[in-house]
Amino acid sequence: MALTSRPRGTNDIIPGDIELWLELEEKIRQVCHAFGYKELRTPLFEHTELFQRGIGDATDIVEKEMYTFEDRGHRSITLRPEGTAPLVRAYIENNLGSGSLPVKLFYYGPMFRYERPQAGRYRQFTQFGCEALGSADPLLDVETIALPLALYESCGLTGFEVELNSIGCPSCRGAYREKLIEFFAPHTDHLCKSCQGRLERNPMRLLDCKVESCQAIMEDAPVITEYLCTDCAHHFSGVRSYLDEFGIPYKLNPRLVRGFDYYTRTVFEVVSSELGSQNAIGAGGRYDGLVEEVGGKPTPAVGYAVGVERLLLALKSQGKLQADMPGPNLYLAHFGGATKMKAAYVAQTLRKQGLWVELDYADRSVKAQMKAANKLNSRFVLVIGEDELANNRAVVRDMQSGQEASVSLDDVGELTKIVGECAK
Ligand code: AMP
């Protein structure tokens, strides 16, 4: 292992890329503000049991993908593989449901899953998620879809599609479960090891299996939508009506089940035509049982998680979200010695006003410094030589318009004003 290579499945976000990230983060905050979601930050690790109970121990994530370790106090700790269970834990622990409902929260940050890395699939990746707790209203399911769509649209993304399903509630799933077990029984020998192990424990998980031979069997499996109880069918029809009302196109996919046990009723995924096999740019659903499962009062809830890296990949391939790369506000060229000292003083004063000021640290020639200023795309340039030092005045040049102005170096208010005006 070379010290210069990062762990498999991780990424560095370097200058040049970070600008896009920051721009996207800004848009996330804007859209969350408009929909009334407040940010909640949870730790990067939690007690392992939270995920075992929350996500379900017969899921790929819990069985194969968690970064779990024992800490020095012999507690089992897991780096968070997703944001919903931690958010629900924090909602209960901080008593956030004590006021008016629903409570609308969002999170943003890294998640960790030991998956096979490939384009768009990483071991550390970033999710933005929005969650509304405390209401079963199908309008909230649709707002939870509308929020990320508003984000995608505000970034200029096109070519994505919403896939929708309802996977019912524990009461309508009983009959479906029996049907699934009956259907899979003759195929048991052809199922992968994980599916064989899950058949009795949690047959719905088989529908989510990525193994090709299993997927071929799944094609003829009975679909949950035919087994929905009256309440779930009614809820699902409410979701579809609001989607129609919002003018959000969607495709019904009765095979969509999602990889977490906590989902109930509505599930959805948004896929992008820009990406290859890892084409889901976000997914979510309703999880009416999770708050109670984690130890809180029965609380219906619904949420969505956006895969930020995948969204950026899709945006990049469409040439969208081009963050501009502005240069410094001012480059201060100098001749070393006392002129450098003066340049440093001016830089310090302007930087305290929030202006980006660059200067030379290598005592290069003024010609080389001017080249550097050009390369950095500095908006203004000012040269401090012996004369400028003696007169305490220098000429600041606007590199865009070519205009020049003589300014004081003693009281740099005037310079701050000229440079600052253009920075707005
Ligand atoms: P999930 O939490 O599995 O429902 O995933 C929600 C979204 O997160 C997916 O639609 C992807 O966009 C993204 N995502 C999930 N797993 C990964 C991963 N390993 N690497 C990158 N993005 C991921």
Image (cartoon, rainbow, N blue to C red):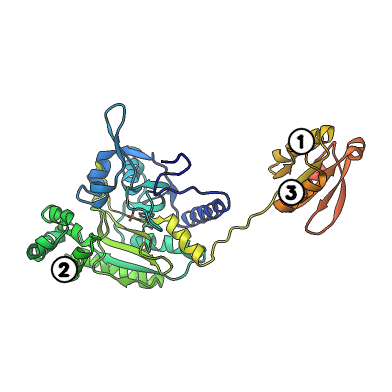
Residue 136, picture quadrant: bottom left
**Residue under circle 3?**
372
**Residue under circle 1?**
344
Q: Vertically, is 134 above or below 218?
A: above
**At x 19% / y 63%, what residue is drawn?**
214
> Which class describes the residues within 10 Å of circle 1: few (<14), some (14-19), or many (20+)?
some
Q: Earlier in the sequence, mark 2 or mark 1?
A: 2
**Looking at the image, in which quadrant does ligand 1 appear?**
bottom left
- Whether residue 9 is visible to the viewer of this picture, yes or no, is yes
**At x 31% / y 30%, what residue is drawn?**
71
**Residue under circle 2?**
221
How far apart are labels 2 and 3 at the CA level? 66 Å
User: At label 2, which amino acid type do we have?
Assistant: Ala
Question: Which residue of the protein is positioned furthest toward the front in this rendering?
Answer: 2
> Which class describes the residues within 10 Å of circle 3: few (<14), some (14-19), or many (20+)?
some
Q: Position of residue 279 (x, y in %)?
A: 37, 64
User: At label 3, which amino acid type do we have?
Assistant: Ala
Residue 286, picture quadrant: bottom left
Q: Quadrant of the N terminus?
A: top left
